[in-house]
Amino acid sequence: MTMKTMDSVQAKYEELAALDKKHFMHPTSSFKQQQEKGPGFIFTEGKGIYLKDVRGKQVIDALSSLWNVNIGHGREELAEAAMEQMKKLAFSSAFATNSHEPGIRLAEKVAEMTPGDLAMTFFTSGGSDANDTAFKTARYYWKLKGKPEKKKIISRQKSYHGVSVGASSATGLPAFRDFPSLAPDFYYVDSSIEALKEMIEREGAETIAAYIAEPVQGSGGVNLPPENYFKDIREICDQNDILFIADEVINGFGRTGKNFGIENFGVVPDMMVIAKGISSGYAPIGGMVISEPLKNELIELTEGVYMHGYTYSAHPMCCAVALKNLEIIEEENLIENVRNMGAELQKGFNWLADRHEEIGNIRGIGLLGAVEILKDKETNTRFSEPVSGKVVEEALNHGLLARSIVYEGQDTLAFAPPFCINKEEVDTIISIIDQSLTEVKKKGIK
Ligand code: PMP
């Protein structure tokens, strides 16, 4: 860049930064930090695994933004799919008996991709409202069956299900529940089978509507379940007439190397919650998928109207974009690449652990991975001041946008790069983490 363009680029940043502070309330952010620091990046464009900001700085998007830009940035086919749909029909309602082709085709595609007898999808704008829909539908179902007292929802500690009142009430991570008033009838168990059994015993199966879990926990730190965990869960839910909801918002549509996370564990849920990867973030869309038996029972039992629908349920443009996204994932065998590059990522983590005694608790499946930074691996002791945030800060200087998870006593680096990543790019991520951790250690950690 010439001096002149550098000046004009900086001027543009400053103009936008001032307006940002004045008017733009950010999701999951600190009011104070925004005013003190202003925006870090003001992104302007993306291509593949890279993002560029208004000052011309390019970074690797190692978390696919919010674990969602799965096919990678800058795919023009999705822009074309959106344009084509919007030119023809930007919006029409799907309420009651109204319908449209993108909604129908996408619902068919989801039924084809999901395991077992999952058959019918209710579309939302994202994951939180999809979870609310699942909780509401589970309770509605039990009410229709003459068991309105079956209304409690059990979720796991460390789970993340979203930020609407219902979804944050189901979220096990305390930081997301620190509000004066949440919804009633939500209960949390740790990730053991015993804990669930005890909870059912204590509360009574006749009061419990559903159990919800992310097959592989995302925001809680990329946590894999113990072996056979979900087989046991499925059995317990069946024995106690409890619906099993799999929250596939992060896992779904290939992230774990299979279409859906739960397929790694050999069971089929009664309901599935989807979002993020269905459109790779190119359009806001999520949904709840229900099984064929559940669908049939609802048909049989319902007399009136199920009074639940968002204006943007099955938004035609979002459906068209999602459909195109799923076609690309299939045509380009991207899920196979997830498996291959996931293996490279794990190799990279092991290489890091050989070089840094602080790296431990390596976890992952497909292109969903994490490492922890530990003072003592033997005893699982963390440093008194979390290190992962400092590594992420340092990594930014080297062109890597990574994610640090420090709540719940963790000190974790999480990765979920786009499915289009290649080996060289995986190696670059690992080498930047290596460099960044080395530099942070040089400055001193305690
Ligand atoms: N469930 C899970 C497992 C998630 O990871 C998220 C988002 N990170 C949500 C639900 C909420 O989705 P949204 O942010 O689209 O409302």
Image: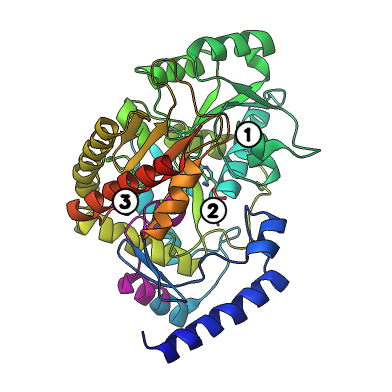
Judging by the rendered image, the residue that carries numbered circle 1 is 170
Q: Quadrant of residue 198?
A: top right
- Residue 126: mark in rendering: 2
Give the distance between the C-alpha atoms of the residues marked 1 and 2, in whole angstroms. Answer: 16 Å
Name the amino acid, label 2.
Answer: Gly
- Residue in the image at 36% along x and 58% along y: 398
- Residue in the image at 25% along x and 46% along y: 338
Q: Pick whichever, 286 or 310, lies toward us.
A: 286
- Could you say whether the residue bearing mark 2 is in a helix, strand or loop? loop
Residue 357 in the figure: left or right of residue 197 = left
Picture coordinates of residue 429 (x, y %)? 30, 51
Q: Is residue 252 visible?
A: no
What span is in magenta? Answer: 60-82
Picture coordinates of residue 439 (x, y %)? 38, 46
Q: Pick whichever, 3 or 52, lies toward us.
A: 3
Q: Residue placed farthest to the right in the image? A: 180
Give the distance between the C-alpha atoms of the residues marked 2 and 3, in whole angstroms. Answer: 32 Å
Estimate how packed mark 3 is, as few (under 14), some (14 to 19) or many (20 or more) residues with alpha carbons within 10 Å: many
Estimate how packed mark 2 is, as few (under 14), some (14 to 19) or many (20 or more) residues with alpha carbons within 10 Å: many
Picture coordinates of residue 422 (x, y %)? 20, 54
Ligand 1: does it lie within 8 Å of the C-beta at label 2?
A: yes
